[in-house]
Structure formats: structure tokens, C-alpha cells
Amino acid sequence: MNITNKTVLITGGGSGIGLEIAKQLSAKNNKVIITGRTADKLQKAAEGLANVTAIATDVTNADNVKQLVATIKSDFGGLDILINNAGHTYVYNLDASANAAEKAREEFDTNFFSILNLTEQLLPALTASPEAAIVNVSSILALTPRHTLPTYSASKAALHSYTQALRFALKATNVKVFELMPPLVNTEFSKEIGGENGIPPSTVADDLINAFEKDEYEIHVGNTAHVYGLSPVDAFKMVNEG
């Protein structure tokens, strides 16, 4: 897939993996739109990057999403690549005081339902592009859960399943569907679960760029490739016991 001179939307693009992807796609002469909830953070992230526009958007807010879709149509004339990267997580154990249902609702709202909504609303723009792509950023935890991230893991497993179904549904169109599956990454997002021990976000971005160029649709970054090759029992043990 050609990844130059395209219009790209990256949700959660103000930091971490999203920002590293924005940097690399900006360097390849693409017009990049980054979104997030905090306008100041987004503007700071966009400073010094060529052809990067920051638009404050809460992807779980229906009115925000409608406005974003309208802006992409009016100000950018369409869209070629959608990267669903925004995420939300709680770190906790499943016990009687966990309030797991409420935490899961918030996680699924960002990590799953908002992706379905935004993707569906942008499909007309994507299918109008001569060559388009959707990238859903899931996780190594889509393959096996981590006990301290129980409902976050479940939301990523749901996203993995949806991505496979979406890829099949769009196979006869011009829209290619990728899934980026990173392991632990050293970002502010993962700080609470030992992110300093993770791989750099630039490595994740590098693997996505390589996958675009090779049309590699399911991208197993770092240890994800190893976990993918294990039995379910051994994969669970590796992620939860080291």
C-alpha cells in the first residue's frame, strides 16, 4: 500500500503510539489529523510537525464525532486512512469491591463502541478514496488476558474479533483493514503497569509502516508474535507469570 500524499486521521494522536505514528506519516508527506480530548496537549504535539492538524475530539461523544466527520469532509475533502488508536484502561483485580461492570463500560465505550461508530461514519469517505485503510490498534491482550487488566483485555479481544469481521466484509472494496497488536509499550498510558519495561512507541510505529508497505494485515509487534505462537494455556502463563 502506498502511504504518501494521503489524508490520515489518528485518534489518541497526542502522545505515545499515536504521536509516533503521526511523526512517521508526516515525514512521508501525508496530511495528518490527530485527535484527543485535551486541546492544549494536542497543539503541543502538533508543533514542529509538518502537515499535522490537531482537532480536540472525545471519540465517545456523539456530537464531537459528528463534528469531526463534517470537518474532515469540508476542510480536507475526504479521508484515506483511519487509525483507531484512542484507548482507556483501569488496572485492578477482580474482587468483590472491583466495580468491574462500571469500569468495563467506560473501557468498552472508548476501546470498542467508539471505534465501531467512528469507522461506520467514515466509511463513505474511505470507500470514496482510490486506496484506503483502517487500522485498529488492539493489543497482545487481545490474544490472552492479563489478570490486572481484565476488562481492558476483554475490550481488546472484542476489537480483534470485530477487526477480522470488518476485514472480511470489506474484502471486495478498496479499503484494507489492518490490526496493530503491540505488547507492553513504554508510554504514559502504560506507566501504571510497568511501561518503563516496554518497547519504545517508535518501534510500534516502525512495524506499522512496514506492514503498510507489505500489506501485512495482522501486525504482531515484539512479544506479541511469540504469544501468538503459544497454546492458550502457555500464552496466559507468559502474560501473567512472566
Image (tube, rainbow, N blue to C red):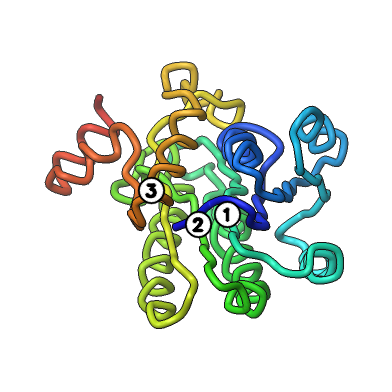
Total number of numbered discs in the rendering: 3
Q: CA distance from mark 3 to mark 1?
A: 14 Å
Residue positioned 75% across, 37% down in the render: 50
Looking at the rendered structure, the kind of residue marked 1 is Ile
Q: Residue at x 62, y 55 (%)?
A: 110
Mark 3 and 2 residues: CB-CB less than 8 Å, in contact? no
C-beta proximity under 8 Å, tags 1 and 2: yes
In this picture, residue 8 sits left or right of residue 54? left
Q: Earlier in the sequence, mark 3 or mark 1?
A: 1
* Quadrant assignment, res 79: bottom right
Quadrant in the picture for the C terminus: top left
- Residue 138 % position (x, y): 45, 50
CA distance separating discs 3 and 2:
11 Å
Q: In this rendering, would 63 be left or right of 98?
A: right
- Residue labelled with disc 2: 135
Q: Residues within 10 Å of mark 3 (few under 14, many from 20)?
A: some
User: Which of marks 2 and 3 precedes in the sequence?
Assistant: 2
List x then y, in percent, for residue 148. Answer: 42, 36
Q: Which mark is residue 211?
A: 3
On the image, numbered disc 1 is attached to which residue? 83
| Near-viewer residue (155 or 204) | 204
Q: Which mark's residue is nearer the viewer, 3 or 1?
A: 3
Residue 69 against residue 24 in the figure, above or below: below
Q: Residues within 10 Å of mark 1 (few under 14, many from 20)?
A: many
Q: Residue at x 60, y 59 (%)?
A: 82
